[in-house]
Amino acid sequence: RKPLSPVSAAMDAASSLMGGPSSADAPTDGEHRMGTTIVGVCYAGGVVLAADSRTSTGMYVANRASDKISQLTDNVYVCRSGSAADTQVISDYVRYFLHQHTIQLGQPATVKVASNLVRLLAYQNKSMLQAGMIVGGWDKYEGGQIYSVPLGGTILRQPFAIGGSGSSYLYGLMDHEWKEGMTQEEAEKFVVKVVSLAIARDGASGGVVRTVTINEEGVKRSFHPGDKLPLWHEEMEPQNSLLDILAAGSSDAMVQ
């Protein structure tokens, strides 16, 4: 039998990815979901992706420092929102197919190819997946690119994209403050500001802010602790948790 191309294999995988009971019959209580804020912004020379780090199981914060920005290739990354399991399996499939694709072509996959593989898996399983994703990267053909793949598997190329539960609070800020041709430093500061606002306003977003900058020179990851983020109107200063206080061995701080 003639071996399948990576794209054909991806289509086969998309058809069988979520075999079994329908989502209507599947239990959802306790599923890990990323009540999330994800952002992707183009700037002059590349792209910056950003995300918060809170993963919840129902009303319980299951992970306060998760990494929602996953690598697909050396030059393409994806921000994940929705069901943690769904977005992780899509990322794993796409990473595998892009590796095959790179070997066959002898050159890195483009951002467009990576985004369309994400779109393919999301669209063909749209009734069974809860996955909203933003794909960002740089290639030698079209430079920095941002593609939004929201719930349902639509694909849109945009100069900036936002997603997740916290995005509801960001449309006005993005429309007002985003500008074309930002420098790398401006873009990095902008996405941190944007995610910090969502963390302040959205109860399902929180933790730290992680950013990934992708351009011709490569990839740079950055980490912004929650106590270093800008504060917004009436937002309280970060406080040590009870566990932090006990670990420090001081009981005085517990008495206010």
Image: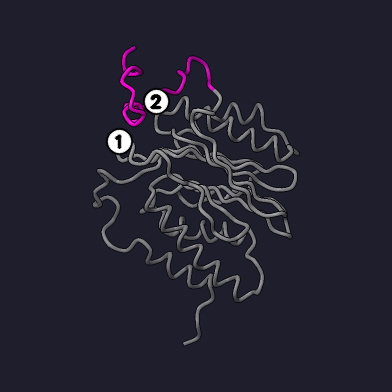
Pointers 2 and 1 in contact (CB under 8 A)?
no
- Is 116 situated left or right of 240 in this image? right
Residue type at mark 2 is Asn
- Is 67 situated left or right of 256 in this image? right
- The residue wearing badge 1 is 60
Q: Residue at x 63, y 44 (%)?
A: 48
Q: Look at the image and say whether residue 245 sits in the magenta stretch.
A: yes
Crowdedness near tag 2: few (<14), some (14–19) or many (≥20) residues, C-alpha within 10 Å: few
Q: How many marks?
A: 2
Q: Look at the image and say whether residue 41 sits in the magenta stretch.
A: no
Residue type at mark 1 is Tyr
Element type where label 1 sits in the image: strand
Magenta residues, as a range?
231-256
**Residue 18 at x, y = what percent?**
35, 61
Residue 127 is marked as none
**On the rendered image, what quadrant is the C terminus found in?**
top left
Q: Residue at x 64, y 33 (%)?
A: 189
Q: Residue at x 69, y 51 (%)?
A: 215
Residue 240 is marked as 2
